[in-house]
Image (tube, rainbow, N blue to C red):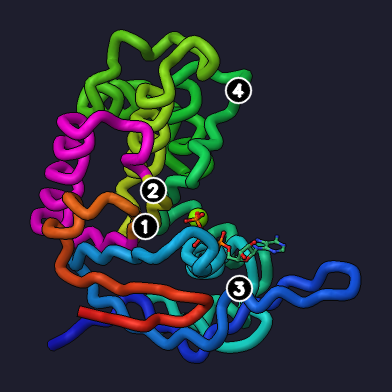
Amino acid sequence: MSDKILRLENVVRDFKRQTEVIHAVKGVSLEFERGTFNILCGRSGSGKTTLLNMVAAIDPPTSGKIYFEEHDITGMSSAERDDIRRRKIGIIFQNTALIAQMSAIENVEFALSIAGVPASKRREQAIEWLDMMGIRERRNHMPAEMSGGEQARVAIGRALAHSPVLLLADEPTSELDSRTSFRVIDMFKDLVTKKDLTIVMTTHDVNIMDAADHIFTMEDGVIIDAK
Ligand SMILES: Nc1ncnc2c1ncn2[C@@H]1O[C@H](COP(=O)(O)OP(=O)(O)OP(=O)(O)O)[C@@H](O)[C@H]1O
Ligand SMILES: [Mg+2]
């Protein structure tokens, strides 16, 4: 039995600016099966981040429907969308978006707290993830006191710490050296096979694409290739 965790039906996103309208996503229909590793690629400006933000229930589409676990997230209130995102979805933004006033470990603990993890369990779980990302010794550093790659690894740990069922990752390895990025991708694949995690990830790195179950190519707001 196939289990489609995510379904997009003719999703459109227009951005209106003064007199112009930018058609960033022009009618995308896609399905993602649970427990698969999916890559979204395409040139800069093709609409990848815009699409991920809609799937993350952060940005509503101009038209079209998005179903997450058969629930239409486009028809939900913002409180309902927040709830789904916090409990079930892990997000790695293109620019890591760590909270600058919080240390590495506090950033991860904060994500755990909004996901509803009890206070008594947060520290241990946060350390475990920072350890997994190889940055345990940097746990008390503020974002400004870490390298770009270290910040990226905190962001990855933060996105995964609450055990989401869906990980949306926007170029999560762009700040990492090739060895570290392969380690991260191996860990992602492991979570997909062992925990049934579904990943939708953008990347420009052709070396990573081999790891994916499916590759979708975007161009000018539409999907031009799926394999
Ligand atoms: N808030 C916005 N207002 C107006 N235009 C926007 C907005 N966000 C994105 N765009 C435009 O929509 C198009 C798609 O942008 P998007 O960020 O989705 O591209 P991308 O595929 O993620 O590119 P990159 O690989 O550079 O990250 C671009 O032409 C961009 O300029
Ligand atoms: Mg982008």
**Residue behind mark 2:** 171
**Residue behind mark 3:** 24
Tell me how far mark 4 sits from mark 1, CA to CA.
24 Å
Tell me how far mark 1 sits from mark 3, CA to CA.
16 Å
Three-letter amino acid code at the position of disc 2: Glu
* Mark 2 / mark 1, whichever is N-terminal: 2
**Residue behind mark 4:** 100
Disc count in the image? 4
Asked whether, in this view, residue 227 is left or right of residue 151, the answer is left
Q: Does the residue labelled 4 lie within 8 Å of ligand 2?
A: no
Quadrant field for ligand 1: bottom right
Closer-to-camera residue (154/223)? 223
Tell me how far mark 2 sits from mark 4, CA to CA.
20 Å
Does the magenta-highlighted stretch encompass residue 182? yes
Nearer to us of marks 2 and 4 is 2
Q: Give the range drawn in magenta.
A: 172-200
* Mark 4 / mark 1, whichever is N-terminal: 4
Q: Where is residue 8 in the image (x, y as percent from the top left)?
A: 44, 83
Q: Which residue is drawn at 39% across and 43% down?
A: 159
Does the magenta-highlighted stretch encompass residue 135? no
Discs 2, 1 touching: Cβ within 8 Å? yes
Closer-to-camera residue (168/176)? 176
Above or below 122: residue 62:
below
* Residue 85 visible here: no
Tell me how far mark 3 sits from mark 2, CA to CA.
18 Å
Q: Which residue is drawn at 25% across and 28% down?
A: 133
